[in-house]
Amino acid sequence: MDKQNKVPIFDTLLGHAKRNVTSFHTPGHKNGKGIDPVLKEVTGDGLYKFDVTVFDEVDSLHDPVGPIKKAEELMAQAYGVKHSLFLVNGTSVGNIAMFLSACDPGDSIIVSRSSHKSIMGGIILSGVWPIWLQPTIDQNLDIIFNSTYEEIKQALEMYPEARAVFLTSPTYNGVATEVKKIADLCHRKGKILLVDEAHGPHLKFNDKLPMSAVDAGADLCVQSTHKILSALSQGSVLHHNSKLVDINRVKKIVSMLQTTSPQYLTLASIDLARRQAVLHGKEMFDKVIEAAEWARKEINEKIPNMRCLTKADIKDRNFDLDLTKLTINVTKTGLSGYEVDEILAKKYNIQVDCSDTFNLIAIMGIGSDMEDVQKLVSALKEISKKYKGTQKNWILKIPSLATEMVMTPREVFLSQDIKKIPLAKSVGHVSAQVLTPYPPGIPVVIPGERISKEICDYLVEMASKGIRISGQEGDVLKMVKVFAN
């Protein structure tokens, strides 16, 4: 634990800054002297001396031998894994790296359709065949669940050739699946388990929270240190704890994907966030959880037309809940989550992380406190009394996504044989694009898939209702890209 007091990147940068070194290296602002005065007035001078480039003193992210290497070793010790690699392009680059590290072109991988959109980059770049799992929708709770142990088990029985399994846990709503059971199953069958734990870098540090994937036995796990802990935006970590994946391959791939001009202030903040979480995480998250539970109880007992997701709501499904996430269903107000989100932002200066037709998702982090949730709950109470919407009978639904994969997404992505056709005439064609209606935020068309009549009808219905579909070209989805041959 004494070693965890150390912050080698931060200490190195601080020592460098104190020496007032004359800069003849990038960046061009030269220790802040060239920063626009308007910006400098807001930020002060100090942080710009931390904005340096690669040289021996501060180490290289791509070949660490000094303070970055020491900081990554401390991170690995903190999480109990073999290796940890710092990421400055966020968890998105970690997801892509996991696909490229675990799989060869032509391998197949089991993955839930509700995974983050960055995995599409991993699938395309690695050249794998995705075996998609249909997400489960709970129309009472108006949320989408990720893969269960039984679903993974069934998929591995149906597709024994699969090289790996990719999970997202916890989800945006804070729902954590049975990662330990899934990890044990994968390893009994010689499969690699990859986990997107972007929303779970804090799970390791408080026993009131679900088990972290690093403790559950994931081979590779990526976490957004910036989402819940105190690192700056884009600061993430990829953990390696595998006998099945070569760490040297992982390092080469991560190096290939990351910038050669990393933001050293971001690296220092990852270093500091680790120390803070190890030394003070339990008591800090005790307070965060206490505040979140107060808000959950207050909403459920005193705002009759709103409902906050609880552990009890998902217990029968063998899921666990990250208590720091507040998923607030607002459909009984007659307002959409988007509308309540806008009211909170414009009238109350409160910004939630995201919203959909049904819910608000308020993410609490290591910096959240009771005053924050009191403001949120107070605002929601006022909104529930002042605003009455007219929307009714919303239903969260998606079509069957068990369609035929004709080509790998990579083959289609790299092909020049693409044409546009009317959406209404797309049935039977092989898609050359991703189309994702919001809600529910799940891609219903993937490159390489044959478009079914059910999917076509669903997209036509969504477009007719004015629902914007991510990936569409133009204001309304009328044409789709398909493989020409």
Image (cartoon, rainbow, N blue to C red):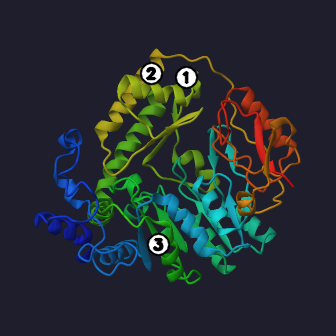
x 41%, y 29%: residue: 345
> Do tag 2 and tag 1 residues touch (Cβ < 8 Å)?
yes
x 27%, y 74%: residue: 55
> Is residue 243 or residue 232 the one in the foreground?
232
Q: Is residue 443 above or below residue 198?
A: above
Residue density around tag 2, few if under 14, some if 14–19, many if 20 or more, within 10 Å: some
Residue density around tag 3, few if under 14, some if 14–19, many if 20 or more, within 10 Å: some
Which circle marks residue 255 in the picture? 3
Which circle marks residue 349 in the picture? none
Label 3's element? helix
Q: Earlier in the sequence, mark 2 or mark 1?
A: 1
Relative image position of residue 203 (x, y in whole percent): 43, 60
Mark 1 is on which residue type? Thr
> Is residue 449 or residue 389 the one in the foreground?
449
Mark 3 is on which residue type? Ser
Q: Answer with the quarter of the image where residue 61 lies.
A: bottom left
**Where is mark 1, residue-wise?**
333
Q: How many angstroms separate mark 2 from mark 1 (CA)?
A: 9 Å
> Is residue 363 or residue 401 the one in the foreground?
401
Q: Is residue 54 above or below residue 114?
A: below
Q: Quadrant of the C terminus?
A: bottom right
Number of marks in picture: 3
**Where is mark 2, residue-wise?**
383
Residue 419 located left or right of residue 50: right
**Of discs 3 and 1, which sits in the foreground?**
3
Relative image position of residue 245 (x, y in whole percent): 57, 80
Relative image position of residue 355 (x, y in whole percent): 52, 36
